Image (cartoon, rainbow, N blue to C red):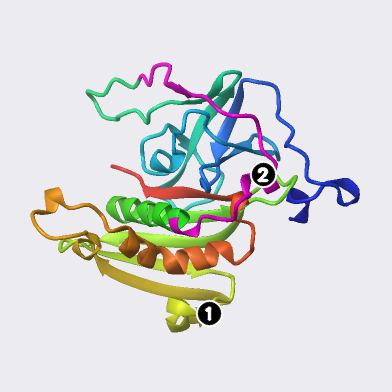
Amino acid sequence: MSDYLVGPAGEPAPAPTIPPLPAHVRFGIPFNGVVPLWFDGDQIAWYRPADGTDLADVLGLGHVETEPGPSCVPGGWAERVEVGTLEEGGLRLRAEGPTGRRAINDAGTGVLIPLDGPLSVPEAMSGGFDTASFAVHIARLMLRAARDGAILVFTLRAPRDPEAHHILSVPSEVDSQRVMRFHLGTLMEMEGGAWDKADRRGGMSLLDLSIPYESLLAGAGPEAERGLDAGLLIELAEPVVACLLKPGFPFALGCSYVMPQQG
């Protein structure tokens, strides 16, 4: 993994190699205002939108076009990963189309987000890692997984390795009382914080979390007028973030959703 940080003979890491454009891409988890683009094959590049767009407000939340993921999943389930196209003018995203008998499944040309030039990892990580914003994004991914009854899968991609490696799965659900339940499972040995209450079985660290949706709302008054409290979202995501950051390579993390198939 150190190849991300330094070049040959200990030289500074160069900017990543970009394949011919247009190029099909999947997405790593945004951080520091930067989005990792995972190309077909084994390359990753890091970009910052030139127009100030925060892709953490877009990616992973069900807005962007998806395709089947590479993981083997049980019958009745399907892995979905978000995809886009890197073009000369920037990153093109298309909306996830509606489904059903009356849906018009035409995402059109999508929207083109202008990007600055590709960054090396040290450039993407300059100024440190914004853990708080990262945690808020992770919490929002968890809320979506609970809403959809999905399994949230986190992966880590090593240099020149076309296959991402599983680091954490989070089967999620919400009941009729809007109590959300998250079942964290990782092969890493976790300790500290909420992980001190985890079980260790079959070589895995297993931790169950339960939280009412209403407890994450800020302020008082009608629910429709209340937003989510950032501090409480960070607290919710803390065990997940601790696991994701343990390997020490937050710039190479990705995620997908394993969704129950309809009908």
Residue 104 image offset from top left, x and y in percent: 29, 20
Residue 79 sits inside the magenta stretch:
no
Circle 2 sits on which residue? Answer: 123
Residue 106 image offset from top left, x and y in percent: 36, 19
Residue placed at 50% from the left, 50% from the top?
255
Can residue 76 be seen?
Answer: no
Can residue 153 be seen?
Answer: yes
Label 2 secondary element:
helix
Taking 234 as reference, is 112 left or right? Answer: right
| Residue furthest out toward the left | 222
Circle 1 sits on which residue? Answer: 191
Taking 262 as reference, is 200 left or right? Answer: right
Q: Of 162 and 55, which appears nearest the observer?
A: 55
Taking 10 as reference, is 252 left or right? Answer: left
Q: Residues within 10 Å of mark 1 (few under 14, many from 20)?
A: some
Q: Amino acid at mark 2?
A: Glu
Residue 124 sits inside the magenta stretch:
yes
Specify the quadrant of the image occupied by residue 190. Answer: bottom right
Q: Amino acid at mark 1?
A: Glu
Q: What span is colored magenta in the figure?
A: 106-132
Query: Which dot, 2 or 1, sits closer to the camera?
Result: 2
Residue 234 image offset from top left, x and y in percent: 38, 62
Mark earlier in primary sequence (2, 1): 2
Q: Which quadrant holds the C terminus?
A: top left
